[in-house]
Image: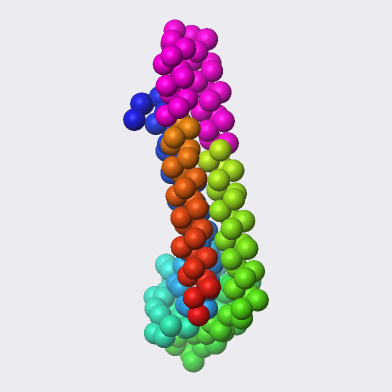
């Protein structure tokens, strides 16, 4: 890999990592602790990630259980969950909070797959934008002391890299779509 293209490969990897992070937050009927990743709890006046104020476990396939480090945090955790976009009402027994995920309907699954595909398209657009920036960078290099042949070679490498990342995005979309449609 040419070091002049390294920065663009790094940006494309970040776009894929972001897509992966987005996909982890999409729930498909199974309890996934990652749906709580973006939730912040008011911990003595400081917005704190939920995972830092309690232990999150998956005791059953469709249930998450949150055991706060301090019992006094139960109300704050419930408030944070209710204020989030998780869409599940928490219940507690005084010591732990439970989130029971409802069975996902076929219609909802299809909507989730559409969302997955939309996020995949956004990732492809991001990768292509990075390629465009790379091509602009290479055109500026061509005006300098780099030969046209070398620039053409670099443009081809950049295109191959872009194609590979687009294939990776498609693979991620397929895997997540199949996961969602599996009952």
Give the farthest residue toward the top. Answer: 145
The x, y position of residue 164, in whole percent, is 44, 42
Residue 177 relative to residue 161: left or right: right
* Residue 81 lies in the magenta stretch: no
Q: Is residue 124 or residue 20 the one in the foreground?
A: 124
Residue 168 appears in the picture as rendered: yes
What's the image's color scheme?
Answer: rainbow
Residue 13, compared with residue 89, is above or below; it is: above
Residue plotted at (46% across, 19% down): 152
* Residue 153 in which image quadrant: top left
Identify which residue is drawn at 41% across, 75% down: 56
**Percent position of residue 169, x then y:** 49, 51
* Magenta stretch contains residue 135: yes
- State the residue lying farthest toward the bottom: 93
The mark total stands at 0
Name the residue located 41 percent from the left edge and 16 percent from the top edge: 150
The residue nearer to you, when weighing 155 against 58, is: 155
Lateral position of residue 63 relative to residue 110, left or right = left
Task: Tell me the residue at 58%/80% (across/down).
Answer: 104
- Name the magenta segment's main secondary structure: helix
Q: Is residue 142 above or below residue 8?
A: above
Q: Quadrant of the N terminus?
A: top left
Q: What stretch is highlighted in magenta?
A: 129-157
- For the question of whether residue 49 can be seen, the reply is no
Q: Where is residue 22 in the image (x, y as percent from the top left)?
A: 52, 58
């Amino acid at each position: 890999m040419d070091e002049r293209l390294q920065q663009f490969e790094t940006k494309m990897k970040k776009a894929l990592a972001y897509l992966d992070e987005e996909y982890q937050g999409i729930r498909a009927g199974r309890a996934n602790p990652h749906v709580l990743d973006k939730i912040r709890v008011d911990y003595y006046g400081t917005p704190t990630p939920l995972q830092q104020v309690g232990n999150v476990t998956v005791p059953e396939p469709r249930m998450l259980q949150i055991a706060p480090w301090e019992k006094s945090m139960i109300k704050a955790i419930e408030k944070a969950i209710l204020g989030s976009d998780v869409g599940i009402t928490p219940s507690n027994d005084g010591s732990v909070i439970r989130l029971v995920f409802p069975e996902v309907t076929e219609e909802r699954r299809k909507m989730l797959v559409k969302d997955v595909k939309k996020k995949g398209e956004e990732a492809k657009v991001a990768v292509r934008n990075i390629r465009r920036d790379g091509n602009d960078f290479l055109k500026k290099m061509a005006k300098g002391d780099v030969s046209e042949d070398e620039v053409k070679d670099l443009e081809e490498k950049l295109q191959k890299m872009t194609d590979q990342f687009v294939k990776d995005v498609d693979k991620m979309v397929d895997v997540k779509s199949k996961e969602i449609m599996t009952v």
